[in-house]
Amino acid sequence: MKKHFDSLLQAFVKHGHVIEDLPDLARLVTNSASKPGVNNDSTQGYFAGCSWICTDGTQYTCINAAVGAAIWKEVQFVNL
């Protein structure tokens, strides 16, 4: 998880974002014991494309952050 966050942070800085923008980056990855729900929406700063990573390693992507009706899909990794 730390490696994933470090990569995001490096990309964030590389593209000209400044430290004051970091709260927006924090919404890209959430470390939680529970999976996201319909109320983890735009009112909490989430937006389509956000990642949510559970402490068990399960990852979700926000498809729609509509108020009270957020849609999160579990990311399925395929071994090649």
Image (spheres, helix red, strand yellow):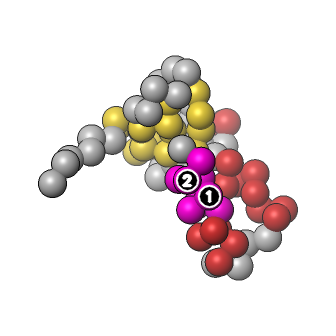
- Can you say whether 7 is above or below 39 in the image? below
Find numbered disc 2 in the image and state the secondary structure of the residue it sits on: helix
Where does the magenta region start and end?
Answer: 2-9
- Can you say whether 64 is above or below 12 in the image? above
Residue 48 drawn at (x, y percent): 48, 50
Q: Quadrant of the C terminus?
A: bottom left
Circles 2 and 1, Cβ within 8 Å, touching? The answer is yes
The residue sitting at the left extreme is 80
In space, the residues marked 2 and 1 are separated at their CA atoms by 5 Å
Residue displayed at 59% across by 70% down:
11
Residue 8 drawn at (x, y percent): 58, 61
Specify the label residue 6 is tagged with: 1
Residue 79 drawn at (x, y percent): 19, 48
Find numbered disc 1 in the image and state the secondary structure of the residue it sits on: helix
Whether residue 50 is in magenta: the answer is no
Can the viewer see residue 71 in this picture?
no
Residue 31 drawn at (x, y percent): 59, 34
| Residue underneath mark 2 | 3
Q: Amino acid at mark 1?
A: Asp
Residue displayed at 68% across by 48% down:
26
Our reading of the magenta stretch's main secondary structure is helix
